[in-house]
Image (cartoon, coloured by chain):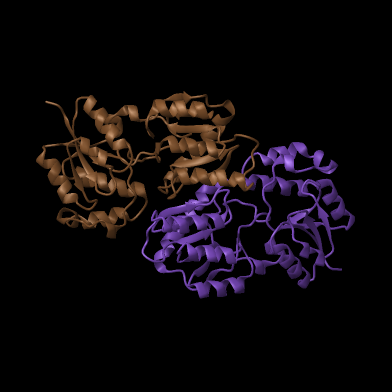
Chain colours: A purple, B brown
Amino acid sequence: MPSKVALICGGGAFPLVAAKAAQTRGESVFLLGLRGIAGAEIEQFPHVWLGIGQLGRAFEEISARDIKKVCFIGGLKRPEFTDLRLDWGGVKRIPEIVKFLKGGDDHALKGVIKLFESEGLQVIGVDALAPELLAAQGDMAGKLPQDLADDLAFARAFLADLSAYDCGQAAVVANRRVIAVEAVEGTDAMLARVAELREKGRWRPKGRAGLLVKAPKRGQDLRVDLPAIGPDTLRGAEKAGLCGIAVAAGGVLMLDRAALAAQAERAGLFLHGFVGEAP
Amino acid sequence: MPSKVALICGGGAFPLVAAKAAQTRGESVFLLGLRGIAGAEIEQFPHVWLGIGQLGRAFEEISARDIKKVCFIGGLKRPEFTDLRLDWGGVKRIPEIVKFLKGGDDHALKGVIKLFESEGLQVIGVDALAPELLAAQGDMAGKLPQDLADDLAFARAFLADLSAYDCGQAAVVANRRVIAVEAVEGTDAMLARVAELREKGRWRPKGRAGLLVKAPKRGQDLRVDLPAIGPDTLRGAEKAGLCGIAVAAGGVLMLDRAALAAQAERAGLFLHGFVGEAP
């Protein structure tokens, strides 16, 4: 009998790809699409559509199919409490929900995991479901230049220290100087800012310089809200005139790895997966 | 005989105001205007114009007037080495200059101070020259709300930790969540970003929320490159829908304090000067 897994699907292309990968691996998948967020293509699989506040319904649908494993996949804008339109199962859990909505994103997501675990469900990460969706180790395209290894170490330590404040999955660093830090705006907006800083002469390196570093927060639960890079990230890095991108191997989603590596090669960007604890 | 002080003048309104304040206090002032950066109004005082690389000339002009005290005042975009057009006095110091241009802004500025001190000059801060240009303690406009005191403490600790990376003189925090962090783009651009996050629904508080916190970096030499707030900062905070602004008392330039306090009152923003080490 195949193992069963429920995918709670947010936006973007990852839910479908993850469902396919899991199915290929022999899992029986059931998709819970978040209404207004997940794409219609998830209907290729057994599925239901749910509002983001329909917690009670989600638990019922999962339990009715005797599913014990759940995986969160896809993007999700942080909801405000008043957007939740909670069903009765949600209303019963208001005290927990209010508590975890106060604080950074990571705090909120840990709260969501706890809610599911308290229903007796096992929350698994993408690494267990479809490891090929995660960044590989070492040089995936080009080669991390020797003189940027120091900037990478600097950026990793910087991001790790920011983690204590539940902030900072990405930064642009050049010559041991922090050019931009990501908070709520997201990586694409941060990269666009770096391109603008160049255009306006606020940052004026000669030619290509610096790198984008992206990693989960230190202590982040890797079962939810993994950082991701995609074609837009690469285009953004190219426009910002960076030398390349370094991501945490196994900790950053890539769709898909081969296509991104090819795109990076064409753009003359290196794409590197680093391992281990931040220095 | 009045004490003499040389003002190395960058951009913005502070050089003129500081010169006037020092003169009122009985100092004899001599202004060295950075060409293309300082405003023409500095010609109201005894002055010379210098290119940013004319270090040798600067030392000669200062020494010729038997001046022993120097104060840096006004804004300065970080120059690239190749923009410097060094004179002979600058060329002789290339090894030091190259060394301090590698690294963050604060590192670079400490290098500049050292260069001047190695000429036997005393580098003084604005606090010694014109303390009325610095943020006062406590509530300067409105009142820091009780429920934002926690966000202020959080933001101060956050900025202090960023200091180790020579980054982060300002951040916007709401409900213990970092909404935006300033790096190279500057405070105005960061505030515009927060306004945009609101418009785009990426940050959706009900009504006014959060605060801008601005402070010198931990361990920053307060004799150069103090952070500043002005009318644009207040307008930016208003557009971003913040509750107010908190700045390090004695560590942030304000032009001028009374006018900014009045503007804040009109805009319904609190303006608070905090003291002591970051928590």
Position of A74 compared to A30: left or right? Answer: left
Position of B242 compared to A99: left or right? Answer: left
Tell me if residue A246 comes above or below residue B135 in the rendering. below
Tell me if residue B249 comes above or below residue A18 in the rendering. above
Tell me if residue A188 comes above or below residue B144 in the rendering. below
Residue A95 in view here: yes
Residue at 50 percent across and 39 percent down: it is B236
Residue B156 in view here: no
Residue nearest the observer in this picture, B64 or A70: B64
Residue nearest the observer in this picture, A117 or B269: B269
Q: Position of residue B72 (x, y in %)?
A: 27, 40
User: In the rendered image, which quarter is residue B216 located in?
Assistant: top left
Q: Position of residue A137 (x, y in %)?
A: 56, 68
Residue at 54 percent across and 62 percent down: it is A247
Q: Position of residue B66 (x, y in %)?
A: 11, 37
Q: Position of residue B199 (x, y in %)?
A: 61, 45
Residue nearest the observer in this picture, A221 or A252: A252
State the quadrant of the N terminus of chain A: bottom right
